[in-house]
Amino acid sequence: MQDGLTPERGENRPRTASKIGRLAAVGTVAGVLVAGIALPAVGGAGFGFMSVADEVNLEPEDLAEPPPAEVTIVQDVRGDEIARFYEEYREVVKLHEMAEVMKTAIVSIEDYRFYEHGAIDIEGTIRAFAKNLQAGGVSQGGSSITQQYVKQVLLNSAGTDEDRDKALEASYARKLNELRHAMAVEQKYSKDEILEKYLNIAYFGAGAYGVEAAAKRFFGVRAAELTLPQAATLAGAVQDPNATDPNLGGKQRERLLNRRNVVLDRMAELGRITRAEAAEAKTTRLGYRGTKLPGGCEVSDHPYFCVYVRNEIMNNPAFGRTAEAREKFLNRGGLTIRTTIDPRMQAAADRAIRKWVRPSDDPAAAEALIQPGTGAIRAMAASRAYGRDKAGNEVSYNLVADAAHGGATGFQAGSTFKTFTLLNALEKGMKVDDGFDVGAGYRASGYSAFKNCKGENIGDPTHTVTNDEGTPGWKTLRTGTWGSVNTFFMELEQRVGLCDTVKTARSLGIHRSDGAKLQEYESFTLGINEMDPVTVANAYAAIGARGKYCAPTAITRITDRDGEVTDFAPKCHQALDPEVADAAADVLSGVFTEGTMRGVGGIGRDAAGKTGTTDDYAAAWFAGFTPDLAGAVSIGDPRGSQEHKLNDVTIGGRHYGSVLGAGIPGPIWKDTMLGALRGVRPTPFTPINSARFGGCGQNCRPTAASPDDGDGSNGPDGDGTGIPLGRETAADGH
């Protein structure tokens, strides 16, 4: 690269006799120091003799060689690549994986006596100094490939701007320091090993670090497949990769072509190729392909999951004490990250969403699929493309996840939260046919009717919660759930306790998407908290796993650059009594046959779930599960769901007066499950313990009670809460 003190690199031009004399005194042949070198003294006649021992401390000095930044590869559950992360796009390869002509070209142009000299090429150094003296300054460098490797190591390992400037400074002190390290490197490695390391660390331009990445970026081939003109091009690029970066335009490509021809001429001059071969190679076009650098979540087929994985690394102190350390671990570590995403299930979710919602629609749909019993995230899909799409629309956050994983505010979860009140009631001993009479409206009996987990009275006797439509009557755990009856669940929550309902939700991983504390108001059961699909799907997955809660899992294995493997087991605990979960599954399965999803229908195997529609149709949800797979679907307007409600809207080319949980989210969930579980043997639910939960106990229907219409008398979803937009309804954003 002849980069020693070249003007192209903008280095200073020191002219003192002492500095030139010191460097002139340095020489090694096969690791032996030359005692003295005579050079014309600057500013005077005659010769000056400088003694190495007197002037410089020239002993080999070990070089710390942290591995160069390498690409991290993210794989799906089958081991296929889905994304890459990197600070420098580099793929380290062995010397035998590089074309012989590439090795010949780089040695010919950068250090043709590389295999003959030691850490410094004395002939090259003296020649460079003689030319510098004639020019009255520094016009030619004399760095060997070993010295260039040392410089690149020091530059790549610079932790601060000061260290980086020091690695680049134009001084003889820097050159002497590099030489000390080069001497140690020559003692430690063979010439082939040094050449391999150099070709893997060098920058070639166009964002490509190392010869493998450069071969792919420039020509779309591996380093082993490089031809003579291609190898000469890359060998020519290392001298000044910014000036010859073909990605920057025509002038740079012209410089690179000229530089390629210089390399070909030099190879012919040295007899490495014939003059005819050089001439023929020079007739070829540059052939730069500009192959896109792989990696980044925007170009991944699974962008939202990719963002989730990245944030999983960035938020976990196990991968580094600081955010900076974790970023280096991810972007420089050369890791292979095996994940949980299943491309077949992901494809099913993508297809289902595309069927019902278009990317150009103002409302956006999002879905997460999670495996019960492991917490493994199998799919994360959305109707909007991540990043900027062809129409110029941009999504810069994770529509499917919480803020900790790149998401935003989320949408109120609506009546999907009634499930947590149902679980609390079953845990406290209620049977599935226990019930009570409810009216068309509900009003708390007093301020003390509800207490949050701080013990504060938060009941609101001035506010009435209503149902969308229908007649009041006797409702049980079954029929109140099937019809999603607001007044029933408000009364039920009052009886079983708000705080215990909140605790039940928390035990299943429920937390606000924005990271704030859960709002503990009396309307908690009506889903006033903003959620994301991953969190809701995972809570429902725990019910499908008979109460076994597992934290959402995206990463199962990380293999580092040295092949060391770290496996990550699911983090699970028993959050619910298994029989309580079984009873809840039994009740929720009726939603498909007797309740708000009966118009959509089931999926031909045991399944359970709950619709959710928020106040005034600001957002809509469906969350459901089988023993094999759970999923949650949300739809709302990212511009602000409270300001842009799902009334009188066209979505997916269909007009909706109002969007209900069973209107779009439910069908998306059904279509997804039919595709995702195709070929998977159905696992049945564990039957309800009828002795414990069957029939009714102390809350049986009185003989003279008003009739129960069976479906909750609450219209198609029954989620009209009538909640004012004050303290109980957050300003919903994203």
Image (cartoon, rainbow, N blue to C red):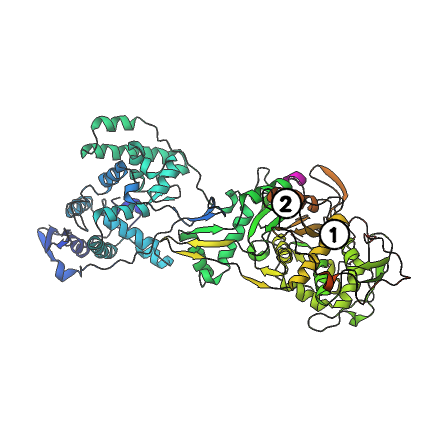
Tell me, yes or no, if residue 344 can be seen here: yes
Q: Is residue 267 above or below residue 43?
A: above
Q: Is residue 343 above or below residue 511?
A: above
Identify the mark nearer the N-term, 1 or 2. 1
Regarding mark 2 in the picture, which secondary structure is present there?
Answer: helix
| Residues packed near mark 2 inside 10 Å, few (<14), some (14 to 19) or many (20 plus) | many
Looking at the image, the residue that sits furthest to the right is: 704
**In the rendered image, which quarter contains the N terminus?**
top left
Q: Which mark is residue 607?
A: none
| Residues packed near mark 1 inside 10 Å, few (<14), some (14 to 19) or many (20 plus) | many
**In the rendered structure, which amino acid carries the disc numbered 1?**
Gly
Q: Nearer the viewer, residue 27 or 660?
A: 660
Number of numbered discs present? 2
Q: Is residue 398 above or below residue 60?
A: above
The residue segment tinted magenta is 353-365
Q: Nearer the viewer, residue 358 or 573?
A: 573
Q: Which residue does the numbered mark 1 point to in the structure image?
A: 590
Q: Which mark is residue 673?
A: 2
Tell me, yes or no, if residue 414 can be seen here: no
**In the rendered structure, which amino acid carries the disc numbered 2?**
Met
CB within 8 Å, label 1 to label 2: no
- Whether the magenta-drawn stretch holds residue 345 is answered as no
Regarding mark 1 in the picture, which secondary structure is present there?
Answer: helix
Distance between the alpha carbons at the discs numbered 1 and 2:
17 Å
